[in-house]
Amino acid sequence: MPAAALKPKPTQSTAKRPVLLDLPYEPVEKRPLPPGRPREWYVTHNRRLKAMRLAIALLDSGVYLPNQARNETIRSTAALIGVHPPSDTTCHMVRAFMRYNR
């Protein structure tokens, strides 16, 4: 087997600088939410989904620590991927996802 085949390929984690987002961003296919839940459940569920999308986009763009993700950074990332600007609560949730998923 040639030596080149055994050499590991560089990944994003070994990149010297942040990798730009793959554009255009395409959301996954949406499925209907289960009926019969209280309205607050739907609000919280959608907020978590939005926060997770934003956390993934921030990680893809090179923002790895929660203290690097200020509200302005999160909102500019939301505009970049085509999501409505998040509230302060959602921004807090994005930082929490980044903190607890380490």
Image (tube, rainbow, N blue to C red):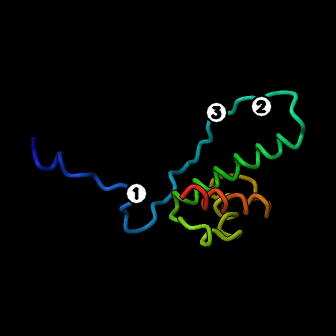
Residue at which label 2 appears: 33
Residue linked to disc 1 = 12
Tell me what residue is drawn at x 50 percent, y 51 percent: 22
Sequence-wise first label, 1 or 2: 1
Callout 2 amino acid: Leu
For marks 1 and 2, give the CA distance.
34 Å
Q: Name the disc covering residue 1, or none.
A: none
Q: Residue 52 location in percent, x, y?
A: 65, 50
Horizontal side of 84 relative to 5 (left or right) equals right
Q: Earlier in the sequence, mark 3 or mark 1?
A: 1
Q: How many marks?
A: 3
- How far apart marks 3 and 2 lie (CA) works out to 13 Å
Q: Is 33 on the left-hand or right-hand side of 21?
A: right
Q: Percent x, y for residue 9? A: 28, 52
Mark 3 = which residue? 29
Give, as a three-letter code, the residue at label 3. Glu
22 lies left or right of 74: left
Question: Would you say the residues marked 3 and 2 are in contact, meaning their CB atoms lie under 8 Å apart?
Answer: no
Residue 96 place in picture, x, y as percent? 67, 60
Label 2: state its secondary structure.
Answer: loop
* x then y, percent, for residue 33: 77, 31
Q: Residue at x 75, y 58 (%)?
A: 90
Query: Is disc 3 placed on a helix, strand or loop?
Result: loop
